[in-house]
Image (spheres, rainbow, N blue to C red):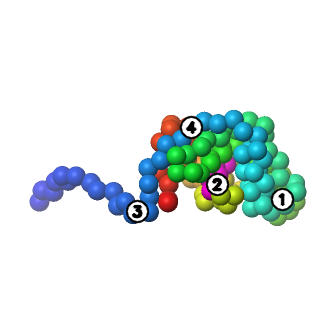
């Protein structure tokens, strides 16, 4: 029996649009991202951020910030600095990726790094 694969079609979400990103330097954008990310952490007041970050403005009106965050676990100890990705529109998080404590196979880490790499490349796909 012989099978041939002639082509592959990736299903496209009709609400997905291709966008472009432009690097920006804005402390207010980073502060807003840090506030929104902190609100998602177990202990928002104890959340720490490294000063290095990348921020991008998209042509669809979103802001993307990639950085590194350290938060507390259920036992009250810090878990260590981990990368994060956040996409913000009108003061609300549209997409948030971070690495959970139990990411033993680095699946989530790859997602975060890929999303930040895509933003840095200048082209992204976003849900509209």
The answer to whether residue 41 is above or below residue 33 is below
Residue 43 in the image: x percent, y percent? 84, 61
Which mark sits nearer the N-terminus, 1 or 4? 4
Q: Identify the secondary structure beneath mark 3.
A: loop
Q: Which residues are magenta?
A: 84-89
Q: Is 101 positioned to the left or the right of 123 in the image?
A: right
The x and y percentages for residue 114 are 54, 45
Nearest the viewer among 39 and 108 is 39
Marks 3, 1: nearer the viewer: 3
Name the residue at 35% across, 61% down: 11
Q: Provide residue 106's location: percent of width, then percent of height.
A: 60, 50
The residues tagged by marks 1 and 4 sit, at their Cα atoms, a distance apart of 29 Å
Measure how far apart labels 3 and 1 are at the Cα level: 34 Å
Asked whether residue 88 is drawn in magenta, I would say yes
Tag shown at residue 88: 2
Foreground: disc 4 or disc 3: 4
Q: Which residue is more in the foreground, 42 or 51?
A: 51
Please indicate, yes or no, whether residue 38 appears anywhere in the rendered image: yes
Residue density around tag 2, few if under 14, some if 14–19, many if 20 or more, within 10 Å: many
- Element at label 1: helix
25 over 37 or under it: above or below = above
For the residues marked 2 and 3, what is the alpha-carbon distance in whole angstroms?
A: 20 Å
Q: Dot 3 corresponds to which residue?
A: 13
**Does label 3 or label 1 sit earlier along the sequence?**
3
Near mark 3 (Cα within 10 A), the count class, few <14, some 14-19 or many ≥20, is few
Residue under circle 4?
A: 22
Q: Which residue is mark 1?
A: 44
* Alpha carbon separation for disc pair 4 and 3: 24 Å
Q: Residue at x 54, y 41 (%)?
A: 21
**Image height of 25 relative to 96, above or below:** above
Q: Secondary structure at mark 4?
A: strand
The answer to if 119 sits in the magenta stretch is no
């Amino acid at each position: 029996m012989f099978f041939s694969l002639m082509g592959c079609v990736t299903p496209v979400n009709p609400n997905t649009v291709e966008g472009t990103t432009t690097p920006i330097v804005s402390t207010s954008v980073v502060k807003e991202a840090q506030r929104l990310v902190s609100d998602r952490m177990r202990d928002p007041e104890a959340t720490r951020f490294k000063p290095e970050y990348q921020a991008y403005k998209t042509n669809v009106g979103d802001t993307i910030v990639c950085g590194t965050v350290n938060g507390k676990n259920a036992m009250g100890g810090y878990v260590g600095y981990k990368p994060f990705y956040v996409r913000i529109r009108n003061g609300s998080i549209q997409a948030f990726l971070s690495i959970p404590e139990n990411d033993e196979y680095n699946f989530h880490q790859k997602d975060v790094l890929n999303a930040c790499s895509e933003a840095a490349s200048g082209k992204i796909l976003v849900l509209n």
